[in-house]
Image: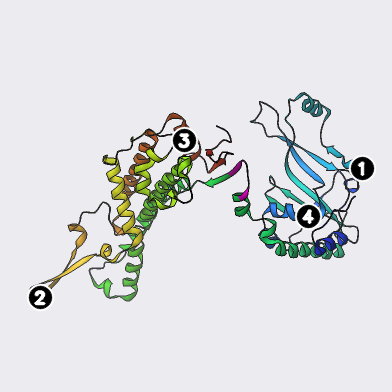
């Protein structure tokens, strides 16, 4: 096997101490024992980082696991084959493949190989072998002993030394070997990225929270009424502490559900803006996505985004008015201003002190004291959010609505492609 040129003496030392094992020397069938040594530190680095680091030391992987995809049978789980690199003429040996499969590949019935995992095999000083590979669609890296009976103590120590040396190199290489944000920005040509669907995550969380609230809020209120604050129970320090503590917690499930619903709406509008904002408005100097708040985005969406019917969202509509009230309520809750926390006013009348609850004299969209919230309040907020989303969907063209329904309303992750001309495409690489 030809020794590759190494970028540093440290990497050369690793190669000499722990050389690669040729494909001809590895048994076709064997068992492994995964090594747990420094696993948490290993996992701090992305798998692509390890791919690059090992490639700089040992060249290309010696074994690939590939999927075979049968045309027009996408519902079936694909089978896999293993390609192992042999020393002579850099040939690849294919294992666990039948003659029937070979014929199907030749006829085109089975699509070409799609690599999903890779492996390196490294020699220890006492002829033990370490397998370094990936699993779960190259998302997890592992180190393992190739078993030939019991693992010798010397092999265990040597394996830990190899891992330590590689971790030292990893620490030195750091962001120079892999810096995803910088690389993605500088990369020319077609780019792909995914967004976590914060709209759907928060909407589902709100539904779960409301479901929990129906039982948990009753439990809290029962605990709150366990003692009577109007009589001597209030003079008992422990009982008073119990009333205060539980009273402060009452309504937290209802308010959490409302908060998740508003976050889901904000996430929906932000994702829509990111997905369909016109290309000429994506200039970083304009920075529209960050500079505009949720109200501005909702008002201007049909004008600034592709795939919408112009002026189809009317800011004078009843739905929009409810959105503004919901936004105001959200700001009251999130910002916790003193003036919004006013609970009561005290008045002395003929020597009697009266505390008047000011909420009775203020127009409130929803109670600002969470103990006063109910399941109906959460349901009303949910209806408002659903109506606003429905209003946005009604303002879309058919194609935009189909994309929104498939990826934003129903997917956990939303795929995007940045095309060669700089435009953004949701869910597909070509228009």
Choose mark 3 or mark 1, whichever is in front. Answer: 1
Q: Earlier along the polypeptide chain: callout 2 or callout 1? A: 1
Q: Which residue is mark 2?
A: 351
- Mark 1: which secondary structure? helix
Disc 3 to disc 2, C-alpha distance? 65 Å
How busy is the neighbourhood of tag 1: few (under 14 within 10 Å), some, or many (20 plus)? few
Spot occupied by residue 31 in the image (x, y as percentages of width and height) = 82, 49
Taking the magenta stretch, the answer to whether it contains residue 191 is: yes
| Discs 2, 1 touching: Cβ within 8 Å | no
Q: Which residue is mark 4?
A: 56
How busy is the neighbourhood of tag 3: few (under 14 within 10 Å), some, or many (20 plus)? few
| Discs 4, 2 touching: Cβ within 8 Å | no
Q: Earlier along the polypeptide chain: callout 4 or callout 2? A: 4
How busy is the neighbourhood of tag 4: few (under 14 within 10 Å), some, or many (20 plus)? some
Spot occupied by residue 344 in the image (x, y as percentages of width and height) = 21, 66
Q: Which residue is mark 1?
A: 88
Disc 4 to disc 3, C-alpha distance? 44 Å
- Mark 3: which secondary structure? helix
Which residue appears at 75% of the width and 35% of the height?
113
- Mark 4: which secondary structure? helix
Q: Earlier along the polypeptide chain: callout 3 or callout 1? A: 1
Spot occupied by residue 142 in the image (x, y as percentages of width and height) = 74, 54
Which residue appears at 61% of the width and 54% of the height?
182
Q: Earlier along the polypeptide chain: callout 3 or callout 2? A: 2
Choose mark 4 or mark 3, whichever is in front. Answer: 4
Which residue appears at 34% of the width and 54% of the height?
330
Q: Earlier along the polypeptide chain: callout 1 or callout 4? A: 4
Mark linked to residue 405? 3
Q: In the displayed structure, would residue 206 be above or below residue 228?
A: above
In magenta, the rendered stretch is 186-192
């Amino acid at each position: 096997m030809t020794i590759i040129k190494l970028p540093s003496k440290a990497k050369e030392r690793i190669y000499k101490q722990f050389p690669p094992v040729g494909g001809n020397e590895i048994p076709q069938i064997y068992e492994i024992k995964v090594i747990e040594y420094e696993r948490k530190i290993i996992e701090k680095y992305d798998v692509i980082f390890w791919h690059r680091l090992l490639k700089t030391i040992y060249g290309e992987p010696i074994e690939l696991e590939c999927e075979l995809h049968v045309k027009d049978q996408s519902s079936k789980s694909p089978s896999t084959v293993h390609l192992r690199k042999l020393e002579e003429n850099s040939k690849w040996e294919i294992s666990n493949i039948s003659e029937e499969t070979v014929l199907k590949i030749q006829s085109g019935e089975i699509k070409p190989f799609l690599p999903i995992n890779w492996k390196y095999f490294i020699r220890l000083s006492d002829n033990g072998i370490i397998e370094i590979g990936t699993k779960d669609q190259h998302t997890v890296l592992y180190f393992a002993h190739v078993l030939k009976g019991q693992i010798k103590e010397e092999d265990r120590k040597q394996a830990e030394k190899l891992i330590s040396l590689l971790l030292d190199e990893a620490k030195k290489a750091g962001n120079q070997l892999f810096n995803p944000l910088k690389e993605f920005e500088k990369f020319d040509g077609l780019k792909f990225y995914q967004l976590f669907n914060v709209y759907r995550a928060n909407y589902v969380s709100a539904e779960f929270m409301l479901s929990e609230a129906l039982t948990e809020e009753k439990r809290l209120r029962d605990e709150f009424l366990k003692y009577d604050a109007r009589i001597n129970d209030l003079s008992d320090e422990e009982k008073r502490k119990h009333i205060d503590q539980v009273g402060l917690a009452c309504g937290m499930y209802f308010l959490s559900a409302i908060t998740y619903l508003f976050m889901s709406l904000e996430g929906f509008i932000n994702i829509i803006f990111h997905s369909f904002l016109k290309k000429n408005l994506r200039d970083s100097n304009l920075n529209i996505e960050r500079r505009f708040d949720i109200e501005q985005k909702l008002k201007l969406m049909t004008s600034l985004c592709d795939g919408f019917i112009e002026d189809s969202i009317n800011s004078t509509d009843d739905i929009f008015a409810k959105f503004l009230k919901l936004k105001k309520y959200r700001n009251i809750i999130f910002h916790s201003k003193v003036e919004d926390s006013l609970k009561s006013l005290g008045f002395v009348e003929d020597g009697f002190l009266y505390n008047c609850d000011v909420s009775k004299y203020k127009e409130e969209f929803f109670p600002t004291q969470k103990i006063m919230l109910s399941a109906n309040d959460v349901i009303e907020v949910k209806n408002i959010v659903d109506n606003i989303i429905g209003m946005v969907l009604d303002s879309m063209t058919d194609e935009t609505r189909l994309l929104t329904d498939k990826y934003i309303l129903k997917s956990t992750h939303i795929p995007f492609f940045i095309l060669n001309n700089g435009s953004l495409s949701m869910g597909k690489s070509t228009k």
